[in-house]
């Protein structure tokens, strides 16, 4: 079996941590049990480019239980949990190519390694795997039946490819499922991002000014959690509707140029490039702390900050200090990469339970229905989304009402008015 991990001796530790995460993933467990019986992915070659965490490991075990021949690589150089990668490789005999802190060359080398068995299904988080397939490994495209995409940034990239007519196989946007973005993005990103910032800095949020850039579902979650810890939250936005929503939710809304002058903490969650740049660094006060929880580190113009700095050093793990000409210090967390995975452990497993249930069932749907699908980006089928919600409620012991025959008739008629 082929794999590239940091240390195989970490496997036993990783196995225990995967077991701990699995205890909070009852929906995925029910899918794994069915997959083990029915083998809906039998003989299907899969390549997955995901954050290699305990929760991802349970998804990988689920896919293997369904009969998939899986290869897994990291979707971010800093998001790998090395003990998890070791456990999957040694105990589960899944080919994993991921090392925390890997350089760019190794990162893309691992993507190529995950493609070496000519995948029929791709599973992506950020669309790097799909991008490499379409740009460097086009000879493999005829083998691919379809794929799934986990994150907002990746869906944006894939929709752009589809609109330009270059996407060569159908992909399901798992990110757009209600049981994914309403919960994973808001509650998962909200908690884990604040967790990462606090772990990296050990600074108090209460009483501070905390800038959240981007008020999508992830931004909403971070704003909620930062405010809950006593921070005075400022939202920056380019979308007037989201800015208006932030105002109505009780937050101050400012242009970044103004927010940069007063903030103690910054967190970008936009999916765009250079949200924080030179003009903002020039205005920041001494000790400003910068982080990113969008998928790529391009949200912070690190090249501009490095050019402005007279010195740069790592002052504590995951914290880099940039000293500017006038003596002001600006701190960047986790190299500007996903702070919740670079400096912490990512989303809680109970949230990822729904996200990865969507991944598993969408992969099954793609295998069964790929011949009817065009080379486009599709949403998760509604019946899958609702089934996951029902399973999650059941696992929590929560019951809901059902429509009566009279109510169903009323909702499906037009004759009855006032």
Image (cartoon, rainbow, N blue to C red):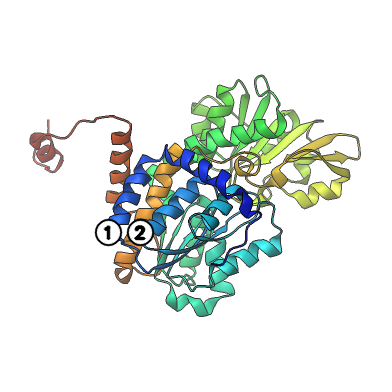
Q: Is residue 347 left or right of residue 356?
A: right
The structure residue drawn at horizontal position 67% and vertical position 19%, both measured from the top left corner, is: 207
The structure residue drawn at horizontal position 28% and vertical position 29%, both measured from the top left corner, is: 398
* Figure check: 111 above or below 289: below
* Quadrant occupied by the C terminus: top left
Badge 1 crowding class, 10 Å Cα cut-off, few under 14, some 14 to 19, many 20 or more, is: few
Residue 400, horizontal then vertical, whole percent: 23, 31
Q: Nearer the viewer, residue 307 or 280?
A: 307
Residue 95, horizontal then vertical, whole percent: 53, 62
The residue labelled by disc 2 is 66
Disc 2 is placed on an element classified as loop
The residue labelled by disc 1 is 38
User: How far is mark 2 from mark 1, CA to CA?
Assistant: 7 Å
Residue 221, horizontal then vertical, whole percent: 52, 34
Q: Nearer the viewer, residue 169 or 159?
A: 169
Residue 114 placement: quadrant:
bottom right
Q: Nearer the viewer, residue 374 or 46?
A: 46
The structure residue drawn at horizontal position 57% and vertical position 24%, both measured from the top left corner, is: 227
Q: Is residue 196 left or right of residue 133?
A: right
* Figure check: 204 above or below 328: above
Residue 294, horizontal then vertical, whole percent: 59, 46
Residue 362 placement: quadrant:
bottom left
Looking at the rendered structure, the number of numbered marks drawn on it comes to 2
């Amino acid at each position: 079996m082929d794999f590239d991990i940091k240390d195989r001796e970490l496997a036993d530790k990783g196995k225990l941590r995967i077991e701990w995460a699995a205890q909070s993933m009852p929906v995925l467990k029910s899918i794994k049990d069915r997959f083990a019986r029915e083998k809906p992915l039998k003989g299907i070659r899969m390549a997955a480019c995901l954050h290699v965490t305990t929760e991802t490991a349970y998804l990988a075990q689920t896919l293997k239980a369904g009969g998939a021949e899986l290869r897994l690589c990291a979707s971010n150089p800093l998001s790998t949990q090395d003990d998890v990668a070791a456990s999957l490789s040694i105990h589960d005999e899944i080919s994993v190519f991921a090392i925390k802190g890997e350089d760019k060359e190794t990162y893309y080398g691992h993507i190529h390694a995950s493609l070496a068995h000519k995948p029929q299904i791709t599973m992506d988080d950020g669309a790097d795997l799909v991008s490499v397939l379409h740009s460097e490994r086009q000879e493999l495209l005829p083998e691919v039946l379809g794929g799934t995409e986990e994150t907002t940034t990746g869906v944006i990239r894939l929709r752009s490819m589809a609109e330009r007519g270059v996407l060569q196989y159908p992909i399901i946007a798992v990110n757009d499922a209600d049981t994914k973005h309403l919960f994973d993005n808001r509650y998962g990103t909200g908690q884990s991002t604040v967790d990462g910032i606090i772990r990296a800095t050990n600074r108090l949020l209460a009483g501070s000014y905390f800038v959240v850039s981007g008020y999508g579902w992830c931004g909403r979650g971070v704003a909620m959690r930062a405010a809950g810890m006593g921070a005075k939250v400022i939202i920056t936005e380019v979308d007037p509707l989201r800015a208006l929503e932030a105002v109505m939710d009780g937050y101050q809304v400012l242009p970044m140029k103004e927010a940069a002058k007063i903030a103690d903490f910054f967190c970008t969650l936009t999916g765009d490039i250079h949200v924080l740049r030179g003009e903002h660094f020039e205005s920041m006060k001494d000790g400003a702390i910068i982080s990113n929880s969008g998928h790529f580190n391009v949200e912070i113009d690190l090249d501009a900050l490095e050019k402005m700095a007279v010195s740069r050093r790592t002052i504590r793990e995951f914290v880099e200090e940039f000293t500017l000409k006038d003596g002001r210090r600006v701190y960047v967390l986790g190299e500007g990469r996903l702070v919740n995975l670079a400096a912490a452990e990512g989303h809680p497993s109970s949230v990822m339970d729904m996200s990865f249930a969507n991944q598993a069932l969408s992969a099954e749907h793609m295998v069964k229905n790929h011949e009817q699908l065009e080379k486009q980006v599709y949403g998760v089928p509604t019946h899958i989304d609702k089934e996951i919600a029902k399973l999650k409620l059941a696992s929590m012991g929560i019951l809901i009402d059902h429509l009566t025959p009279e109510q169903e008739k009323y909702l499906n008629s037009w004759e009855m008015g006032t």
